[in-house]
Image (tube, rainbow, N blue to C red):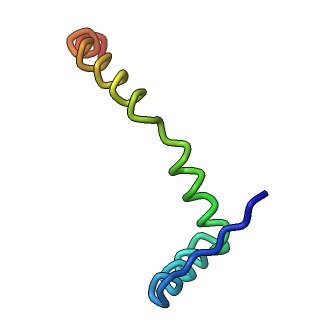
Amino acid sequence: MATLTISLSDEEMRRLEMLGKREDLTVEQMVHLAIHDFIGQPDDTFRAAAKRVMEKNTELYRRLS
């Protein structure tokens, strides 16, 4: 497992701590969740393919809804 050290401004840290208290999470947990959310996003190839499918089948989807 790798360890990462980052620098935050006092304001950024204060806001993270406030959000953490509100969500009942530590700053480390929130950063970990944010990283997982970011790296778990579909890549551009998938997004382009999904967009083509949605555009190609717009009329079909409209009729089915």
Quadrant, the C terminus: top left
Q: Give percent across and percent down for residue 1.
A: 79, 57
Is residue 51 shown to the viewer in this render? yes
Judged from this view, the residue extending furthest toward the right is: 1
Say which residue appears at 60% left-offset and 79% top-offset.
21
Residue 25 seen in render? no
- Give the number of callouts: 0
Point out residue 62 in the picture as x, y percentages from the top left corner: 23, 16
Q: In the rendered view, tell whether residue 42 sits above or below residue 48.
A: below
Residue depicted at 60% across the width and 66% down the height? 30
Residue 22 image point, x, y percent: 56, 75
Against 37, residue 54 (above or below) is above
For the point 72% across and 66% down, which residue is it? 3
Left or right: where does residue 50 sit relative to residue 14?
Answer: left
2 w.r.t. 53: above or below = below
Q: Is residue 63 left or right of residue 49?
A: left
Pick the front one: 10 or 3: 3
In the rendered structure, the answer to whether residue 20 lies left or right of residue 48 reads: right
The quadrant holding residue 32 is bottom right
Q: Which of 52 and 1 is in front in this view?
A: 1
Residue at image position (57%, 56%) is: 35
Residue at the left extreme of this rendering? 59
